Image (cartoon, grey):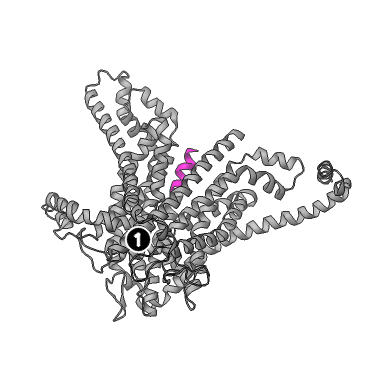
Amino acid sequence: MAERAVLGVHRGRQGGAGPGAHPSIGGRRRSLADRIGERGLYLLSLAAASLSVVIAGGLVAKVLAEAWPALSAFGLDFLTTSAWDPVHGRFGAAAFLFGTAVSSFGALLIATPLSILIALFLSELSPRRSRGPIAALIELLAGIPSVILGLWGILVLGPVMRDTIEPALHDTLGSIPVLGNLFGPDYSIVGMLPAIVILTIMTVPIVSSLMREIFATVPAATKEGALALGATRWEMIRTVVLPHARPGMVGAVILGLGRAVGEAIAVTQVIGGTEGIRANLFLPSDTLASRIAGQYQGATSDLQIASIAYLGAILLALALLSNGVARLWVRDAAGAAA
Amino acid sequence: MRLRQMAVDPLGARVPNLRRRRIVNAAWIGSAWAGASIAVGLLLVVVAGVVARGIGSINPTFLTTPTDPFGSGGGISNAIVGTAILVALASAMAVPVGILTALYTSEFASRRLASGLRYVLDVLNGVPTIITGIFVFGLLVVGRSQSGWAGAAGLAIVMVPLIARSGQEVLALVPSGLREASLALGASRWRTVLRVVIPTSIGGLVTGALLAVARAAGETAPLLFTCSIFPNLVQTDPSRVLPNIPITIFQFSESPDPVKHAQAWAAALVLIAFVLAVSMVARLLSARTRRRLQELR
């Protein structure tokens, strides 16, 4: 009752002559509209939210269904077979699992320390005025479409890799007993190393901005306490910031790993797309995601398409695993601090 | 450990390794500066590289003629038109769904349901976009053929979690006092949402949508299986395969022909200019909205 009266008065004042002259009628109409609107907005938003969940669920179901023929034909042997032979219908993911592991871990090996340094710089070190612009620039780096990074990787980075960086690496590291084989004497434009570099460029902005958020949750009083006790800035960071942020940092790195594992386009452009497992970073290789992308025009048989979807299912499992775990981790870290 | 040691000698002046500590500190500061410079430097190197190589091929003809099938000359007007249509269609699908999802979590859902939804959206956001491509391929392409609709659906699936998540963050910033004031004046819930909550947060909602558009415009992987085999002519019917910029760059970059490379650089410049412009507008808008919301608190 009260609601109707208030609305009626409001309407009357607003409308002047015309329908507003009968506040009670206006009020009743509005309450009908309210009932429809209330229900309508609720149902619409509920439908949208359900659609998001249905998409997530449908995606998993559909990829598994697509992969089914290959799943039933190869079973788990798919994971340990490294053949990719459309002519004889023999397919396996081992080589691509290896390539995914090496490229992603390689990228994170470089990206993690770099991201920590950038995040520390932005949260503890940089002058207040330059903090915003630098953070924005780094996030713009995250916004560069991967296909453009791939283009840059194959046409600019590739030749530099072959002519300068790879020979230099071979000369300095190639003589180390076992490890030296990673830096073998075959130089090429496409290969594992350019893929690692491109993935590093792609993951640094994400991991560093996540870490910056986590560092921002360290209580200022604790940091000031350490400084007041005579700690240098580095000692303050080592004894206060890093221990406080550790769980969140692990989560951020896992999220970066998930991103690196799933990147298809840029990796396809620079990795060279070959089968086989080789312990030489300079040689072409292939990852799960890049093999899928590389096959988009070439799939001839249903079994091959199903095998591509099988690769996709493995990739999806890895992505869901890393994301599912890391999100909980990051959220707990941020939540505990809040 | 270090802290305890210093607590004994708070002035630090007589700690024997002070010199060493200063050196370590300086080394750390130096490497943090170096790290940030490397990241910013990389951005500049990549962007400058694209601009330097692409700018020479950009001219009115390049922007207004379709790709020449035999590789000599020609432009990318077909890809520009196609990408515009694809992104517009994807936005038409994803913006309402994303914003309504955000509204549901912030206005209607219980706390537990809301956090569950956020989690699902985060995970959906982490799904590799090539998988989105496989999903849409299985859903809309198998048994039919590639089409603009399928490509737009793939891009929309990439956009929804981005829009919904950023929308949720912005809606959470709307002070509950505003909502309560509106409800206390007798306004119903949906009117409160339409008249108070959305107008207050509109800048942030638009920011989220713009960032998603910038992301979708450059996405290649969802289009690879759904909208990649197209003719070299301007196509506006989404039930056919729409030519688009990302796939064009992808295919040209894999070609051995230097003419194609030059075109790929020019197409990349067009794309990067669009993406950076949109995300910069979005960032300015978001800074403004956040400041306003902070003042309201």
Q: Secondary structure at mark 1?
A: helix
Give residue A46's position: percent from left, percent from top.
63, 58
On screen, residue B23 versus residue B212, left or right, reads left
| Mark 1 belongs to chain | B
Towards the viewer: A180 or B149: B149
* Type of amino acid at the residue the image marks with label 1: Gln
Give residue B194's position: percent from left, percent from top.
68, 48
Tell me how many marks there are. 1
Q: Residue at x 87, y 45 (%)?
A: A17
Q: Residue at x 59, y 55 (%)?
A: B101
Q: Is residue B165 visible?
A: no
Corner quadrant of residue A93: bottom left
On screen, residue A35 versus residue B87, left or right, reads right
The local crowd at label 1, few if under 14, some if 14 to 19, many if 20 or more residues have their Cα within 10 Å, is many
B170 in relation to B77, above or below: above
Give residue A322's position: percent from left, percent from top.
40, 55
Give residue B265's position: percent from left, percent from top.
34, 57
B238 in relation to A252, above or below: below
